[in-house]
Every structure is written in structure tokens, then in C-alpha cells.
Image: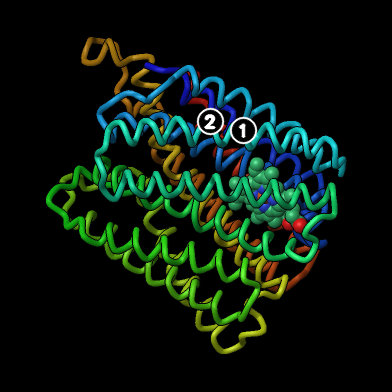
Amino acid sequence: MSRLPFLFIVTGIIGFAAYQVASLASLFGFLGDGIRGPSGWFHVHLFVLGWATMLAMGAVYQLIHVILQTPIYSERLGYVHYSVFTVGLAGLLYGFMSSDIRLIAVFASLAFIGILLFAWNMAVTLFRASRWNAVTLSAACSVSYLVLTGVSGMAMGINFATGWFNDYHENLFGAHIWMGTVGWFGLLITGFSYKMLPMFYLAHDYPTKPQSVVLLLWNSAAVVGALSFLAGGDGWFTWFALLLLAAAVVVYNVHLLQVKKKRHKRTPGSGIQWSLYCSQAFAFALIGALIYTGVFPDRLLSSDSVLMAGWLYLGGWVSFTILSYASKIVPFLWWTHKYGKRAGKPGTPVMADLLSDKKVNVGLTAIAASSLLLVAALAMGSEAFITIAGAALAASSAAYIALISFVFAR
Ligand code: HEM
């Protein structure tokens, strides 16, 4: 079995732990004092690139050959991608922290080259296999949005360094965040869930049409949202993108329930159950946000609304879903690597022995509860409350990721 997914997943876990430590060290000040500055850039990219993207790339390398039944185009290219992306990211984070434009320029370019190598590897693998369905199309679209997120990030970096196209910086900024969050993470999570959930629920004969509807709606939301920011026009254009996204999320949730209904395994494990609750909460929050910003349109793009929405989406849905899935992905990967050849022989543990489901449940419950506290603290705007809720979240997250990491010691 390839070691490539391990490298990404272990580095992602280190990124997650580093984010918790950095957030605690700054007492979550970066959330309270306006996020657009060196400290905000550092924390946000440590989270989105060092944790979520790193782990997502590992999951792609692990699952793509299960999905396509063919190996990845080039494993060696995967290792080059890992090295270039990781060095680029480490330098970029240092550059953000120290506000050093030259460092940002050099290392952002390296991280971007890493993203391009990943996209190339995926594109050749997908086109060679030519097995097009909602899962593979979602993966292809999500990686394309990652590339576009990198392009807009690079363009903002060039603007910082040269002052060129100053008037377009804010447009690029909105499109960058929208394509990274809704496009890259959104389509990757939904697409992979169509494979993961039936696998863990042992579900068969569920309808697959809703997957195509979600793919279409989600892509429309990603494109309309990005264009609305690039055009810099009317807020209602962005609101329409939010409406499309809400429709996509509702159909996605209906589909998840259809899969659950057709299950042959009663309990798929706490991680999978929590991922379902999280997607349902996401749908309710999004509908709430849609109604709220429909009634108060001036709140749509105000900085505190964007901060709250970004936190709910990235911390609440993206990261929580990844944490939930990690409780399945990591034991699967490790068990296959270490015990796969001895399966069924006396003394060989089964996969469920590697990670206690009860502890996973406690960990995810604590993270969910402290995330809700942080949302309340952000809504109240109280710095002290943000620090307390943030510390509770960091502590529960660190304990949970330690629990997942112990799988590698089994
Ligand atoms: C090579 C890749 C990337 C580069 C070079 C890059 C660059 C940048 C830059 C220069 C900014 C600051 C813009 C400003 O405040 O005016 C920024 C902000 C941001 N980026 Fe990226 N980015 C990259 C990838 C990503 C990805 C994959 C995401 C995923 C969601 C992302 C999410 C964000 C967010 C949420 C912000 C706003 C945070 C803040 O203002 O503190 N970025 N990025």
C-alpha cells in the first residue's frame, strides 16, 4: 500500500495541532481583532491549507483508486507534489506571520506549483480512467476550484508586491474565499460522501439522481458567487448564489437520508452519524442566513457577518466533517497497511479495535458543544467569552486529534 496518503494525513494532523496551539497562544485574538492582517492570514491559511487541504489531498490519494479501480497516474509526482506544497506552505505561513512580501511571493509560488502538480496528477488519472459520474465529476470540479483559488491568491499577492490592479483587490478577495470554501471544500466533501456513506452504512439501491442535482446546483452556486464578487456588483447577485447553495445543501441532505434509509448496517459508527448531524445543522444555519440577509440585505457582506459565516462554514461544516470522517479513514488506512496481510489470522485485531467508538463520540460531542459556544461568543462580540469558548474548542480538538493519532501506535 502506498505511503503517500499517510504523508498528507499525518502532516494535516500536525497542521491541525499547530493551529490549536497557535490559536491558544494568541488567545483567539485573531478572531476578535479583525481577521484581515498578518495574524489572520497566518491562522486562516494554517487552518485551510495546513489542515483541511492537506488532509483532503491525502483522502483524495487514498480514495481515488478505490473510486476508479485504477492506480493514480504517477505516485512519484504525488511525492514531488507533497514536498513542493509542504515547503511552499511552511514558507508562506512564515511570510504571512512576518508580513514579508518577498517571502510571501517566493513561497506562495511554490505552494501554488504544488497545487498545480496535484491538479495535473488528478486530471490525467481521471481522464485516463474516463469513469464519469457524480463522484468523479465532483472531484474534478473541486480540484479546478482549488486551482482557481490559488490563482486568485497569487493575484492578490502580486497586488501586494506591485500595487498593480489595486482597484480589483477586493473583487479577487471575495472570489478567492468563495471558490476555496464553496468550490474546493464543498464539492470535495459532497462528492466523496456519495462514496463514503454507502460504504460505511452498507447501503444499496438508493437513488443516485439527487447526486447529479446537487452537483449542478453546487457548481452553479460556486460560479454565480465567484462572478458576483468579480463583477463587484449588486449584493442580490451574491444572495442568489447563497440561495443556489441552500438549495444544493437541502437536496444533499435529502440524499444522505435516502442513503441512510437503504442501509444494511444499523450503526455506521459515531463519526459517520456526527457527519450527518453536522450537514443537517449546516442546512438549517444556511436557510437561517438566507432569510436573515434577505430581510436585512446590508448585513450580507458586513465584516462580522462574513466572519461568522466563514467560521460556521469552515470550522463548523468543513473541518467537523473532516474530523468525523478521519475516525473512519485513519483506522482503515492503518489497519490495511499494518494488518491487511494477516487479516483473519489468530491474534490479528479487527479494524474496530484500533479506535474506541465511544471516545470518538465523546470527542466529537465536546467539539460540537464548544463550537456552538464560540458561535455565541462571536455573535455577542465579547472578547473574554471568545477566549473562553476558543480555549474549550482548542482543548477538545487537541484531545480528539490525539485520540485519532494514537491509531498509528496500534
Ligand atoms: C497558494 C494558495 C493560496 C494563496 C497564495 C493565498 C493567498 C491569500 C492572500 C494573499 C490573502 C489575503 C488577502 C487580503 O486580505 O486582502 C488570502 C486570504 C484568504 N484566503 Fe487564501 N490563499 C491561498 C489558498 C487559499 C485556500 C485554498 C483557501 C480555502 C478556503 C483560502 C482562503 C482564504 C481566506 C478565507 C482568506 C481571508 C482571510 C483573511 O483575510 O485573513 N486561501 N489568501
> Is the CB of the residue bearing disc 2 within 8 angstroms of ligand 1?
no
| Residue at the outermost left position | 205
Q: Label 2 near label 1: C-beta < 8 Å? A: yes
- Asked whether, in this view, residue 54 is left or right of residue 143, the answer is right
Q: Quadrant of the N terminus?
A: top left
> Is the CB of the residue bearing disc 1 within 8 angstroms of ligand 1?
no
Among the 4 quarters of the image, the one containing residue 311: bottom right
At 71% from the left and 71% from the top, the residue drawn is 304
Q: Quadrant of the C terminus?
A: top left
Which residue is tagged 1?
A: 113
For residue 11, above or below residue 400: above
**Identity, as a three-letter code, of the amino acid under mark 2:** Leu
Q: Residues within 10 Å of mark 2 (few under 14, many from 20)?
A: some
Observer-nearest of 142 and 201: 142
- Asked whether, in this view, residue 109 is left or right of residue 142, the answer is right
**Relative image position of residue 75 (x, y in whole percent):** 44, 19
Observer-nearest of 258 and 126: 126
For residue 368, above or below residue 75: below
Q: Gap between marks 1 and 2, in whole Å?
A: 6 Å
At 34% from the left and 62% from the top, the residue drawn is 216
- Is residue 363 at least partly visible in the picture? yes
At 35% from the left and 51% from the top, the residue drawn is 273
**Identity, as a three-letter code, of the amino acid under mark 1:** Ile
| Residue at the outermost front position | 164
**Relative image position of residue 260 (x, y in whole percent):** 23, 55
**Relative image position of residue 225 (x, y in whole percent):** 53, 67
Observer-nearest of 170 and 318: 170
**Relative image position of residue 299 (x, y in whole percent):** 66, 81
Which residue is tagged 2?
A: 117
